[in-house]
Amino acid sequence: MKKSIIKKIFIKLCKIMGYEIIDQNNFTSPTLNKELNDNLSILNDKSIVLPLGEVKISRKITSVLILFRTNSNVEIWDQNKKRLFEEPKIEYTLRSLKSLIKSINFSKEKYPSIKIKLIIVDDNSKEENLNKIKNLTKNSGLEINILNLDHEKYKKIIKKQKNEQTFSNLASLLYCYESAKKYGKDLVFFVEDDYLHFTPMMEEMIASYERISSQINKDIFMCPSDYPYLYMNNQKTNVLIGNKRHWRTVNKTLCTFMTSKIFIDKYWENFYKTCMDRHNPFEKYINEIYQNEICISPMKSLSVHFTNANSSYGLSPFIDYKKIWNANE
């Protein structure tokens, strides 16, 4: 009885002092009143990963603006190949959006205090396809706006391209970057419409962002996909601990990534120049930023880029592609 009283007093003192304790005999945390297999972290307060302990959160997250860029008319931009499963492009767009909505709702259940807004930037989809996109958003329970791309607005800004597809790609990307500057407040997530996302994707990105940026005391870039081309050279990398998985530092991404509004403003010239012409590589000026800032991608992947099976920019390793495809039918 005496030991039990002393234990209760000790637990209360630890809570008052802001410490967490572990009872490894019972595999619980008495101060958190949780099993050790549960999520021990507290959003915008502390990130706890066994056995590494606690990281105090100094970089608190208030909102995420998601800009989902769609083009349901073009099968694969800049290529004459077919995607995995060889379905019409609208099928990838719909499954991508469905998986993104599921991931957002899962995150909102975990972190209800974070405001998440989804904007769909549509590049002149056929009416039939646009109606399918709209129908998918109706019962999502989310704040979703659809913006339509005006090509004429950008014809005097973007350098003349060899084909309409390239111009359209650059214009829609610039529209997304401009929308990020206009509507973004904290984090901004740029997403293309041929990625399928695992349900915990948004939760893991938010929680890992605040943990890692708090550790290094600065904002970062995050890519949700583990691209195969990252393993095709002898590039050195650092491995970091996120919320529930490992992350690695990378110096290249495609155009699906998350960062802060602060970095969008700071590197606006890089974002803007990316859209002025077709560069080689396409993301040349985005990748330049990673010479000065940290960019990370997950191991294993949180999102899968559904391109051609042989593309080095496509399917992430060690994923059940058919399972995630069928799950978002």
Image (tube, rainbow, N blue to C red):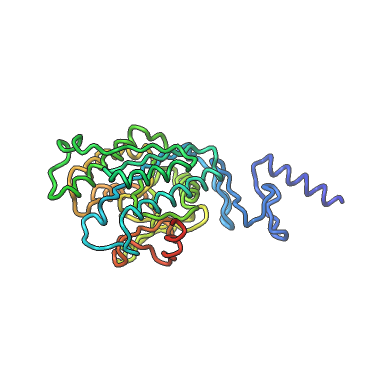
The percent coordinates of residue 294 (x first, y second) are 37, 49
- Give whichever of 46, 286 is nearer the camera: 286
At horizontal 42% and vertical 60% (from top left) the residue drawn is 325
State left or right for residue 10 relative to residue 44. right
The percent coordinates of residue 110 (x first, y second) are 56, 45
Is residue 259 visible in the rendered structure shown here? no
Question: Quadrant of residue 111 in the image?
Answer: top right
- What is the count of numbered marks? 0
- Give whichever of 239, 264 is nearer the camera: 264
Q: Residue furthest front?
A: 128
At horizontal 42% and vertical 46% (from top left) the residue drawn is 136
The quadrant of the rendering that contains the C terminus is: bottom left
The percent coordinates of residue 93 (x first, y second) are 35, 51
State left or right for residue 164 relative to residue 329. left
State left or right for residue 219 relative to residue 242. left
Q: Residue furthest top?
A: 182
| Residue 143 higher or lower than 22, as above or below | above
Is residue 134 visible in the rendered structure shown here? yes
- Give whichever of 53, 144 is nearer the camera: 144
| Residue 17 higher or lower than 92, as above or below | above
State left or right for residue 26 relative to residue 206. right
At horizontal 26% and vertical 40% (from top left) the residue drawn is 174
